[in-house]
Image (tube, grey):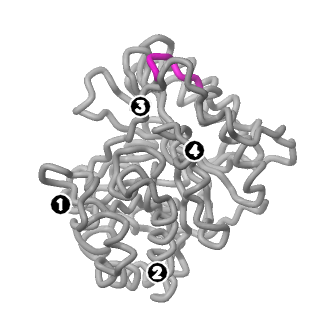
Amino acid sequence: MVRLRFVSVWLTLVMATVLVHPTPAVAGTLPEGTVPQAGRRILLPVVQVTQMPVILGAYLNPEVSPQYYGTLIDEFEGLVGQEHGIYHYYTHWPLGDFAVGHDVIFGEIAARGATPMLTFMSIPASGNNPNGCGDRNWNLDSIIDGDHDSYLRTFAQQVAEFDHTVLFRWGHEMNLVEYSWSGYCNGQDTQKFIEAYRHIVDIFRRQGADNVRWIWSPNYQSWPVEPWNDMHNYYPGDEYVDWIGLVGYNWGESRSDSGYRWATFDYLFDDVLRDMAARYPDKPVMLADFASVEDDGGDKAAWITDAFAQMASYSNLQAVVWHNFDPPWYDGVNFRVDSSSDALDAYQSAVQDDEVTGQAPYQ
């Protein structure tokens, strides 16, 4: 498959009022004896072809103002000793349209030669039900019925005026239970997810936002593990997907989110990467969110070294976006690359390898 690259310009991001801390979604613990989702995947050998270097990316949480995002990038790249080609952050629809700060953030990213990536979350983000599960104002019917069309049209029109290609991810981890767009929160109706996803993309296209590349982004495993919730039941079709963006974290042995195990890169991604290569051979894959905790049953530095060593084994894996965040609401969870000196040393070494690149996917 061809990896497109496009030129970059100077841009900057994020104001505290419009940008949000992401809460990584977590899968429930699999009951003993349960056959994991991967057991039903199509597992074909990954055919080795001439492999292009894997694009490096990072999630950086906007902290102060949109104008400060460029400084965050500079500090991160100074820390790790390598440019990254994708910079990622999250927003919630109620926080405003593109012109409230995203334009500045995108500008800061592009000005440094990287591609902006936005996780575009249709949730209330506040109140007693911040993820919107079961809320008619935020469920899939609200999107399909056009309740948010005015907001989406405005956002799309503004993005269309941005001079660079951008990555958009709506509906991530739809095969878990957390979010308003999940099948679980919408009567186990995966077709509604497809309709809503297509509705959003169609609005952007009608507004001329041809510079948007769309990421379909399931978690590496489905929860609940039931036939209706197979991740592929949510696939909106090749014409609506530019990238497949897998999500998976090593949460360590002390948390149910990893099934009380130290989840290696192979455990998280080997089966699903092979499955995606077999089902969607023409689609580039990224790890849209991935990271490891510090030594909770294993060694984070070794985890990083092992992960980057394995990436070249998958011809469809074209980008990886490290979730560089220390979520304050999870005790003992720190995904930052500098959670320890050993982890930082491992990341610094890994990103210097010829198998990875800091070049942006679009220039």
- Tag 4 near tag 1, CB within 8 Å: no
| Marks 2 and 3, how far apart at CA | 34 Å
Task: Describe the element under mark 3 as helix, strand or loop.
Answer: loop
According to the picture, the residue beneath numbered tag 2 turns out to be 204
Give the number of the disc on residue 17. Answer: 1
Q: In this view, does 4 lie above or below 304?
A: below
Which of the two discs, 1 and 2, sits closer to the camera? Answer: 2
Residue 154, position in %: x, y? 33, 83
| Marks 4 and 3, how far apart at CA | 16 Å
According to the picture, the residue beneath numbered tag 4 turns out to be 227
Residue range of the region highlighted in magenta in the rendering: 259-264
Q: Is residue 290 above or below residue 228?
A: above
| Marks 1 and 2, how far apart at CA | 24 Å
| Quadrant location, the N terminus | bottom right
Q: Kindly identify the amino acid type of the residue bearing the numbered disc 1.
A: Thr
Residue 73, position in %: x, y? 40, 50
